[in-house]
Image: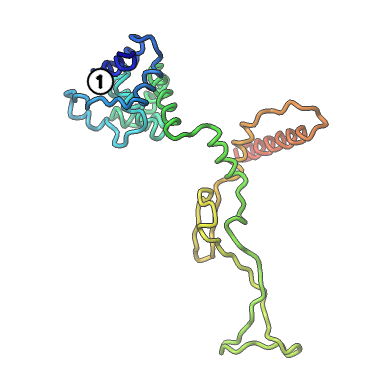
């Protein structure tokens, strides 16, 4: 019998990842990869008798890797629930309230304290990695999305301009210019929405047609540019290069944003 087959038997018998890894002298990630690759499925765990209030602790929506968190951790039930809730909103106060059933003031104090707990931080880090794997998402994907928001163009969504329209009298008869003998016209502005199937709707924050006409709002481009700029590496170039100009522009933009924030205070 191979090491993987013996490990599977131990897993199905209820042994934790870390104990299996220690027994066969491999990493925990190796054990997890064996489980995923070979489709190990453990039977439904036995329910422990708990106080009726504990039903409120369990979150309604399970997140990726929660099964592993619940099976293979030394955290108590409320700490596990805190981790699960935290990954839903990334709000320690809200997560603590949901997990422990306390008021806002208590949760605000204890939530940040629990978030700093070494075991909780370790479990959250593992869950975040699993979430990223399940979503096939990394930091570059998020930066690419920010870049799209930063450089979105209203022209991609609207057609606008002005054109001459014929004028008519109240009775519907065309108004004729006595000098030229031609129908009189008036210059009017127009704004048209492009068809939904022709645009990237993920960059739109709001679209509506109200009493004042068409309203199209994109996500905050300045905020997206600021986030991108803060994450760009400082170029190591000579002063006479093109990149130095870009660096100077970037530093200038940072100063503008800094000055604007100071003026708002």
Q: Pick whichever, 181 or 107, lies toward us.
A: 181
Judge from the rendering whether residue 181 lies leftward or rightward of residue 217; answer left or right. right
Q: Pick whichever, 170 or 208, lies toward us.
A: 208
Dot 1 surroundings within 10 Å: few (below 14), some, or many (20 or more)? Answer: few
Identify the image's colour scheme: rainbow, by chain, secondary structure or one colour: rainbow
- Judged from this view, the residue extending furthest toward the front is 1
Q: Pick whichever, 74 or 67, lies toward us.
A: 67
Q: Is residue 105 visible?
A: no
Q: Position of residue 265 (x, y in %)?
A: 59, 38
Judging by the rendered image, the residue that carries numbered circle 1 is 12
Q: Position of residue 11 (x, y in %)?
A: 28, 18
Q: Position of residue 168 (x, y in %)?
A: 61, 85
**To which quarter of the image does residue 124 belong?**
top left
Q: Residue at x 42, y 31 (%)?
A: 131
Q: Residue at x 40, y 29 (%)?
A: 92
- Judged from this view, the residue extending furthest toward the right is 240
Judge from the rendering whether residue 162 lies leftward or rightward of residue 239; answer left or right. left
Q: Is residue 68 visible?
A: yes
Residue 196, relative to residue 37: is it above or below? below
Q: Pick whichever, 70 or 55, lies toward us.
A: 70
């Amino acid at each position: 019998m191979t090491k993987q087959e013996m490990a599977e038997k131990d897993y199905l018998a209820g042994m934790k990842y870390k104990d299996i890894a220690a027994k066969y002298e491999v990493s925990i990630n190796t054990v997890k990869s064996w489980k995923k690759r070979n489709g190990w499925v453990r039977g439904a765990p036995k329910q422990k008798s708990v106080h009726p209030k504990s039903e409120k602790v369990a979150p309604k929506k399970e997140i990726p890797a929660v099964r592993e968190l619940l099976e293979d951790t030394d955290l108590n039930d409320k700490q596990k629930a805190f981790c699960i809730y935290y990954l839903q909103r990334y709000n320690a106060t809200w997560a603590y309230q949901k997990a422990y059933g306390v008021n806002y003031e208590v949760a605000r104090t204890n939530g940040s304290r629990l978030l700093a707990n070494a075991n909780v931080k370790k479990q959250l880090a593992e869950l975040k990695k699993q979430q990223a794997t399940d979503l096939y998402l990394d930091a570059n994907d998020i930066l690419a999305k920010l870049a799209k928001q930063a450089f979105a163009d209203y022209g991609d969504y609207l057609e606008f301009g002005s054109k001459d329209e014929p004028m008519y009298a109240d009775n519907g008869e065309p108004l004729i210019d006595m000098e030229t003998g031609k129908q009189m016209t008036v210059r009017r502005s127009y704004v048209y929405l492009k068809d939904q199937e022709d645009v990237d709707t993920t960059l739109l924050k709001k679209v509506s047609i109200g009493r004042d006409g068409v309203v199209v709002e994109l996500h905050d481009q300045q905020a997206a540019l600021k986030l991108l700029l803060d994450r760009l590496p400082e170029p190591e170039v000579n002063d006479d290069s093109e990149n130095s100009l870009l660096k100077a522009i970037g530093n200038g933009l940072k100063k503008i944003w800094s000055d604007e924030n100071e003026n708002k205070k």
